[in-house]
Amino acid sequence: MIQVAGKQIEWREGMTVSDLLAELKDPHPYAVVRINQQYVTRPNFEHTYVPDDSEVYLIPMVAGG
Amino acid sequence: MPDYHFKATKTLDYKRPDITNGYAGQTLYVNLSDGQIETKPVDAKTKKTFIGGKGYDLWLLWNAVQPTTLWNDPENALCIAAGPLGGTPIYPGSGKSIVATLSPLTGSVIDSNVGGYFGPYLKFSGFDALEIQGKTTSEVVVFIDGINEKVQIFETSGLPDNAYELSAILTEHFAEGKPRNVSVVSTGPGAKNTLLGCLNFTWYDPKRKRARYKQAGRGGVGTVFADKGLKAIVACWKTVTADTNNPADKARLKDVAKLHSREIVELDPKQNEMAKIGTTHLVTIMNDHDLLPTHNFRYGRHDQAPNLGQEVYRRLFDPGFDGCWMGCTVACSHGIKDFVPLSGPYKGKKVFVDGPEYETIAGCGSNLGIFDPHTVAEMNFYCDAYGLDTISVGTGVAFVMECFEMGLIDTTHTGGLDLHFGNRDAALEIVHQMAAGEGFGQIVGRGVRKMKAIFAKDFGADATIMQDIGMEAKGLEFSEYMTKESLAQQGGYGLALKGPQHDEAWLIFLDMVHNFMPTFEQKAEALHWFPMFRTWFALCGLCKLPWNDIIPEDNKDTAEPAKVMKHVQWYADYFSSITGIESGPEDLINMSEGVYNFQRIFNLRMGFGRREHDGLPYRAMGPVTETEYESRAERYDKQLSEIYKFDIDEKSTAEKLAALRKHREQQYDTLKDAVYNRRGWTNDGIPTLKTAKRLGIDFDDVVELLKANGVNS
Ligand code: SF4
């Protein structure tokens, strides 16, 4: 099970960040998510796997500077 | 403990005014040439037009200097102000001071904002702003004692030069057992011996029992301070509560402060964990998006960047509350305890490093090809202690490293230093030389613009290539973001009033990653609204981080998520509740617009507020060398053929490089047109008379200046 934005999502083998975002049906163009303490950015969404039991945070918008 | 001495040479006893709705209603004037100390009332028109903070600084400075004044002339004024909201301990990020003066790097106005307790203590002592003119050959400390209603000038001897020890000694000296009552502003030997001097503003950390500091870094403000003969300015104040600003509507203030404060406590752990890792999360995020400057802004990504990322600093930072102002729930000002430098006067000794933040990591790390967090921390420590701006140092050293690698300079010029990228010892050695005013560091300390001239004239280096790779504009070194792929951010840097610092507009993600502003008009709109709103923080004495670094969960569903309008409305309520001047979001923008345009006109007065001064080195716009082009050939080839309809078949890299450059330079020029138009400026980048009138800044001397520059309507 994965915790994301207050929801529980069923984990499956080989699930990537892109898969997870698609499942959430949230159209916001996230550029960054955090899996536990590890940041993952959009260029890496497709090839980063989400481990089971992880907590995923959707980082709303990187305002920087 | 060194044997130091203080001799009071001047004392002003004064009656402290009550703070009314965030304002003291007067400013403090000190002239170091003749020891004059006096208070000056602030009239209603000044208050309405300039609001406070940076606005007050600019007005004082405008009246202090002439168009011919140089940064080191006695009449140059160093101004420091809080703002009407500054010093509120219940609203996050409300302790900023804003420094303004004529910059030794740009020759015009520089402003720099900084945490620490000084600005609020200055105001609560009875002064909305401090203006220091004149200079002295002795070393002096200006002491503003709001508790005993006294301002004093002390001649001092025996005090250490570096800010690390000086801050600790002066805190203890003036504390009378209550170190939290004291805030010290000082610089260090690097400020005296270079043009890149910063100022350190302290805040006392009761848990760690030490004076910590934040830096007003940009534009050589510390160099002006040192040149005046100032050793330190110290402010002393007692307990601060929500009542100290005497808000117009305390209940309303408490409500809005609670909303913002609680939201941060709830959301920061779910977002960027700034209370634990500061701004270090940006390192890997920027790296993944090809935006982290490496090797003098050649590239935006490096495999070793994670060595400088948040996971490393999470382990290095000393855990605990790190708010640079009381009650700031973002509390992002972290530090490293028991750090042991490997070089310099503190070699082998345990010290506390205040930082590093993202800018220092990128400037003194990746941009130098250094991916070792220990070296970055050591550069950070010494730059602060020596009073050097880590951004200008980083960008300056990156420039000389590239010149060295290109063969434009060699060891005969560098005093034997091997300045290849990644040489950690050499980078640190330059910092020590800057502080001592010796060797090659003495040249580096003059900043990129002057180095370009020296290298061309004295070393025969190619001026054209240095113009392309020397990352300065208006004389100020770039802060640490790659802008090649974001036209809007090129504008954010090139059109910024003081030079390329990101505090006016940081649009890279909106523009490049989210593509929220595809047209020139949309970019121009963003380059209007964001600089105006960010200016407002500097008028009020606030930190911008709580505005858009922790974001409401429903923000993404709003019409303009980048503006975080829920928070803008909270800021409007905050302003209304303290000052009693009922204001909405649009009013905040209007307040800034007057001051912003005034600063642009001030630039014009000092000889650089025109279109020609808004230029950028080409590296900020695109690849300078064939190697750079080829490293991202797919991206550039695609742009050339798909967007610019340039036939790339059988074209050499040199031909493609030239074609891309032509298009990108044209785009930047078109952007200038759009932004000037949106801001109500002439095509030469000067505010029109109509704009000046609309904003209430059509003072006689402003009108005269505009007319003298051919602006008649
Ligand atoms: S957000 Fe960080 S920099 Fe801003 S006031 Fe708070 S602690 Fe200081």
Image (cartoon, coloured by chain):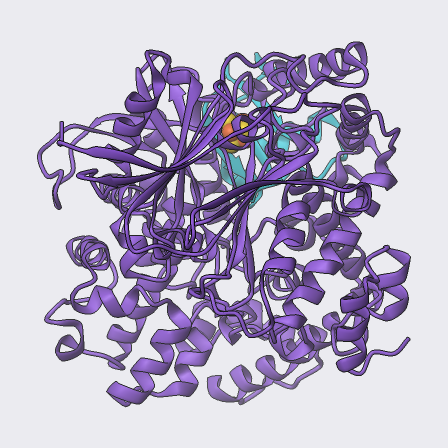
User: B676 or A2: nearer the eye?
Assistant: B676
Could you say which quadrant of the image residue B643 lies in? bottom right
| Residue A14 seen in render | no
Q: Is residue B347 above or below residue B105?
A: above
Colour applied to chain B: purple
Q: Residue at x 22, y 56 (%)?
A: B427
Q: Is residue B130 above or below residue B617?
A: above
Q: Residue at x 74, y 49 (%)?
A: B532
Image coordinates of residue B89 in percent, x first then y, are 60, 17
Image coordinates of residue B44 in percent, x first then y, are 81, 41
Q: Is residue A31 above or below residue B122?
A: below
Image coordinates of residue B52 in percent, x first then y, are 69, 40
Q: Is residue B193 above or below residue B314?
A: below
User: B580 or B269: nearer the eye?
Assistant: B580
Give left or right: position of B542 versus B522: left
The C terminus of chain B sits in image quarter:
bottom right
User: A2 or B656: nearer the eye?
Assistant: B656
Give left or right: position of B197 versus B259: left
Q: Residue at x 43, y 47 (%)?
A: B35
| Residue B588 seen in render | yes
- Chain letter, colour cyan: A
The N terminus of chain B sits in image quarter:
top left
Image coordinates of residue B178 in percent, x first then y, are 37, 12
Q: How many marks?
A: 0
Q: Residue at x 43, y 68 (%)?
A: B631
User: A48 or B173: nearer the eye?
Assistant: B173
